[in-house]
Image: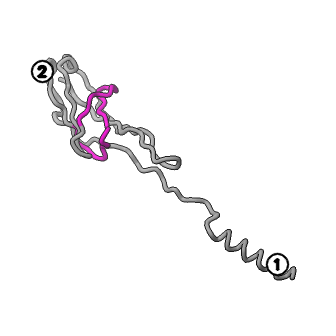
Amino acid sequence: MRTVYNVLLGILLTLTLACGYSSKNYGTPASNMPAISQLNPGSTSAGTQAFMLTVNGSNFAAKAVVNWNGSAQATTYVTTGQLTIAVPASAVATSATVPITVTNPATSNGMYGGSPAQTSPAVNFIIQ
């Protein structure tokens, strides 16, 4: 009888362990890295009037923001490849090179996923 008990216990343990007691693969967090390919316009003259700046690129999230010289601006999402901002005349009053970046917000996919906020490499906007 003891042999039958040991055989049944072994079978039960084998089936229990085979039913999912292993490490789970929750995948890797999705990349959220935006990229800028072009600014339109790419430059302007110092002292010009306010204008709309179009930022073209890829992987822009719906709540992405354009950063002008490191400061987040009110951003209009057009598509995953295009954002716009209104640049006031005061921002282009003097000659400068202004770094433009795009930041996608952090995402949360529950306990095991998500990604932090990610900012694109800078593209320079020239004020001549």
Residue at which label 1 appears: 5
| Nearest the eye: 16 or 57 | 16
Magenta segment boundaries in residue numbering: 55-76
Residue at which label 2 appears: 49
Position of 85 relative to 61 (above/below): above
**Three-letter residue code for mark 2:** Gln
Q: Is residue 60 magenta?
A: yes
Left or right: 116 as drawn, with respect to 81: right
| Nearest the eye: 69 or 115 | 115
Left or right: 72 as drawn, with respect to 41: right
Q: Position of residue 97 (x, y in %)?
A: 26, 25
Q: Position of residue 64 (x, y in %)?
A: 31, 38
**SS category of the residue bearing label 1:** helix
Taking the spot 64% from the left edge, 64% from the top edge, the residue there is 21
Quarter-wise, where is residue 70 in the image?
top left
Taking the spot 33% from the left edge, 25% from the top edge, the residue there is 71
Position of 30 relative to 122 (above/below): below
Please name the colour scheme applied to the rendered image: one colour
**SS category of the residue bearing label 2:** loop
